[in-house]
Amino acid sequence: DIESRLRGARTSLRLNTATAKDSPAWRTFRDGKLLSNDWGVERIRFDENPFVWPEHWARMQRNMSARDWMRRGLAQDIGPERMLYLSWEREHNLRPVPAPWAEDITRTELASYGRNIDVLVGHDPGKLFDVSIFLKAFRLPGSGRVHWWVVDELTTEQTTSEQHATALIKRLRDKWAVHKLDIRGRPLSDSPVALVRADPYGDSGERPDRSVYTIFRQLGLDIRPAAYAPVKQGQATSPRAGRIGKEARIELVNSLCCNAAGERRLFVACDDHRQPSAPRLVAALEMSERDEAGGAETQRKDTNDLSHWPAALGYA
């Protein structure tokens, strides 16, 4: 406990060595400490260390990837070598919600889907995890563009769709003041509401099928597929659930995090200690990698699968 061991020191400093870790938990710990004037970080490159022979560094560099060398030799904070969400940068994309000097325009942006929509929710149903990501839209002073902030996340493990939807609407009511009830427990007609965009359903019996949507709607949640495809029916055209390409979804999230012009329009909210409002989403964005063949989200759908959180974000 480095802070306890300082109790006998009056004016001296305690030094603690650490190699930059490719770990969201480590980054969150470091960012929180650096908000205090009592903590600081000095980055020491390999060529600034007088106690190690140059041959050691040369051998070390030969036997690791360029990206590992940037982290371990050049003391840089970088993600995995085959990082999937390569436009995400914690320094720029993890930011406090800009209120009160920014205008909350969530209702305006979602007005075409209904009235009084105060929260956008992306939902990814799964066999092990059900994940919902909460977003709000803001207009920043001097900018005509819409900027989105992830403000919350809800993850339930090995639950039914009904259990997750029940937990979701409770979180929306308790924390975000939407879907409010009157004193008799009935929905208020003029209450703010949430819009849920989810993994488009299929008819194969695999999740999500139509029953997931039915369950959400029975609880009063407006849930819609994240994409529609027009279907010709005689002279009329009607929409049905569409298909979202995996790479297109990933490209969308990357482009919102930072586009080719260097513009960032997607952020994850944090508190004054830089603790993320959606820690599992941040971990997934920072740790997701492509496989050796360049494929994305090809790992087994087990408890180590990171795809649920970015997928829910993409559906939103």
Image (cartoon, rainbow, N blue to C red):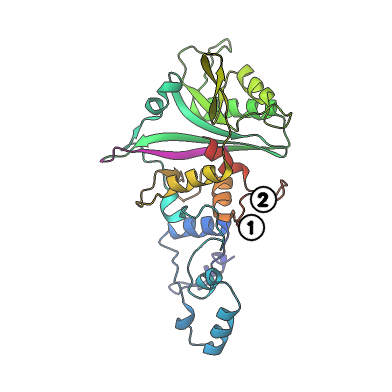
CA neighbours of label 2 inside 10 A, class few (<14), some (14 to 19), many (20+): few
Task: Tell me, for residue 207, which label it has, or none.
Answer: none
Estimate the x, y position of residue 147 in percent, counting from the top left.
38, 39
Query: Tag 2: residue type?
Result: Thr
Front-lying residue, 17 or 112: 112
Q: Residue furthest left?
A: 142
**Which residue was labeled with disc 2?**
298
Residue 226, above or below 83: above
Residue that mark 1 sits on: 291
Dominant secondary structure of the residues highlighted in magenta in the image: strand
25 vs 269: above or below: below
Q: What residue type is disc 1 on?
A: Asp
Question: Can you say which quadrant of the picture contains the N terminus?
Answer: bottom right
The stretch in magenta equals 142-153
Residue 311 visible in the snapshot? yes
At horizontal 41% and vertical 50% (from top left) the residue drawn is 258
On screen, residue 17 above or below 254:
below
Q: Is residue 129 magenta?
A: no
- Is disc 1 in contact with disc 2, using a CB cutoff of under 8 Å? yes
Residue at 54 percent across and 18 percent down: it is 238
Point out the residue furthest to the front here: 234
Q: Is residue 185 left or right of residue 209?
A: left
Could you tell me which secondary element the residue under label 2 belongs to? loop
